[in-house]
Amino acid sequence: QVQLVESGGGLVQAGGSLRLSCAASGRTFSSYAMAWFRQAPGKERDFVAAMRWSGGSTYYADSVKGRFTISRDNAKNTVFLQVNSLKPEDTAVYYCALKTIWGTIATMGRTGTYDYWGQGTQVTVSS
């Protein structure tokens, strides 16, 4: 089993920044990916960013390109999401997810392809 624990959310003014963290513990895998999704009240859970652990390739939703950056600390099995230039529409619960098989680029944004999820961390952006 894998446990994912997010942290770093909070209340920030528009234009501000936060750094979200997701620490993974438990079983490890030779080829996997970690990602961030977000879910606003009454809306579906949307893809934000993903990183393939082998090689470090990164992928972003169009809505966050240039503002959000996904990165990792290999030694700590931790993935980060640096969120800059925040907008009120970025308000959501941010979830960390891990998939044990990379699959294809086409599947990285599909929630059903991820095997493990964290509990989420709330990000609220005030205008």
Image (cartoon, rainbow, N blue to C red):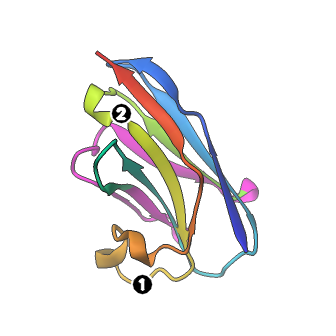
- Residue 48 is left or right of residue 98, and the answer is left
Q: Is residue 108 magenta?
A: no
Residue at 26% over, 33% down? 89
Q: Quadrant of the C terminus?
A: top left
Q: Earlier in the sequence, mark 2 or mark 1?
A: 2
For label 1, the residue is 103
Looking at the image, residue 79 sits to the left or right of residue 5; the answer is left
Judge from the rendering whether residue 58 lies leftward or rightward of residue 63; answer left or right: right
Quadrant holding the N terminus: bottom right
Q: Position of residue 96 (x, y in %)?
A: 53, 55
Tag 2: residue type? Thr
Residue 7 sits above or below residue 48 on the image: above
The magenta region covers: 49-76
Q: For residue 91, which numbered disc appears in the image? A: 2
Density class for disc 1 (Cα within 10 Å; few <14, some 14-19, many ≥20) is few
Query: Residue 93: which quarter of the image?
Result: top left
Residue 105 appears in which quarter of the rendering?
bottom left
Return the residue nearer the eye: 3 or 79: 3
* Residue at the image point whose x is 54% and y is 41% from the top: 121
Closer to the eye: label 2 or 1? 2
Q: Position of residue 46 (x, y in %)?
A: 32, 56
Residue beneath the point at 41% across and 27% down = 124
